[in-house]
Amino acid sequence: MDRDGEFDIREAPGMACGRARGGRPSQQDDLICLDDARESTSLMVLADGMGGDGAGELASGGVIHAARELWDERAWREQPGALFLETLCQAAHTEIRRRNAWVAAEPHSTIVALLLRDGQAYWAHVGDSRLYHFRGRRCLSVTRDHSLARLKLDRGEIREADLARDPDQHVLLRGLGGSEPPEVEHGYAVLRPGDGFALCSDGIWESLSRSELAGLLREPDLFAALHGGLALGAERGGELGDNLGLILARSQRPTSWLGRLAERLSIT
C-alpha cells in the first residue's frame, strides 16, 4: 500500500503496481503483481472494467480473481507461457460471464497480462489496455489497441498523435465478458539486461508519453517512480480524469541454466 495513502500501490521484487481513481466516482481499474522467486517467475495482470451500476468494478475484479486462482493452482508450471496466458484470458472471460447475474448491467473488461519466466517474457491482451516493452530509452514494441479509433488509424483516417483524443477510442472491438469467447493477442521476447515493461490502462497511456513511461522505468526506486507516474496522470486528467492503472517491471537475471543460455544466445 502507498506510504501516504493517496494511491493504492503494491510492490514485489522487480515490479510495482498501483492505481488511482482520478476524477471518476468509482474505481474500475484493477491489477495484481505476483512473484515466485524460487521458480524465477512473475505474473502481472491489469484490467479496466466497463459497465454502469457497479458492473465495471465487478468485471475487473473478476479478471484479478481468475488470475489469483490460476496462480495459486500453479498452472503456469504445467503450461507453456503463451498457453497459460490464453488460459488466463479465457478463465477471466468465464468468471465475468458468471458474475453477469449479480448486476442489472452487463460487465465487460479489458485485460493485459505479462508473464516473466526465467529470462523470457510472454504477454497477452484484449481491449485497449496496453503493454510497452522498453530497452533503456528505446520502445521495442507496444500492443495494438482493439478499438475503433485504432482501426481508423490503420485505415489512415486519423494520425497516431490524435488517437488518444479520438471520440471512437473508447469503442472497443474486443473485450472480456461478451457473448463469444475473446480473441486474444499474444507477444513474446527473450529478456536482455535493461529491459522494462509498462502495463497501463487508457487513463495512463492517454496522459503519459512513451518517453515518460521509459523514464519511470529508469528510476532506481520503482515505488517512487510509479507514485510519480500516477500523480502526473491524475494531475493531467484533472477533475474529470479517468481511472489510472499502472504496472512497472524490470527484467531479472535468469537463475536456471536454460534461462542463462537463452539470455546468452539473445546477446550474441
Image (spheres, rainbow, N blue to C red):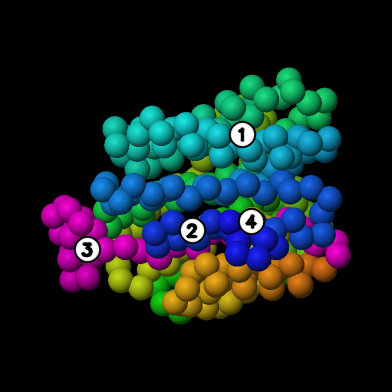
Q: Looking at the image, which is closer to me, 18 or 127?
A: 18
Closer to the eye: label 3 or 2: 2
Q: Which residue is mark 1?
A: 62
Q: Earlier in the sequence, mark 2 or mark 1?
A: 2
Q: CB atoms at circles 1 and 4 under 8 Å apart?
A: no
158, above or below 58, in the image: below
Start and end of the magenta stretch?
239-268
Quadrant in which the N terminus is drawn: bottom right
257 sits left or right of 100 in the view = left
**CA separation in Å, label 1 and label 4:** 18 Å
> Which residue sits furthest right?
239
Q: Which residue is mark 2?
A: 11
Q: Which residue is mark 3?
A: 263
> Dot 4: few (<14), some (14–19), or many (≥20) neighbours within 10 Å?
some
Q: CB atoms at circles 3 and 4 under 8 Å apart?
A: no
Q: Looking at the image, which is closer to me, 167 or 251?
A: 251
**CA separation in Å, label 2 and label 1:** 21 Å
Image coords of residue 207 (percent x, y)? 70, 69
Q: Amino acid at mark 3?
A: Glu
Q: So how many labels did they put on this image?
A: 4
Q: Is residue 14 magenta?
A: no
Image coords of residue 134 (percent x, y)? 44, 70
- Mark 3: secondary structure: helix
Which quadrant of the figure has residue 72? Answer: top left
Q: Earlier in the sequence, mark 3 or mark 1?
A: 1
Q: Earlier in the sequence, mark 3 or mark 2?
A: 2
Q: Amino acid at mark 4?
A: Asp
Q: Amino acid at mark 1?
A: Gly
> Dot 1: few (<14), some (14–19), or many (≥20) neighbours within 10 Å?
many
Q: Earlier in the sequence, mark 1 or mark 4?
A: 4
Q: Which residue is mark 4?
A: 8
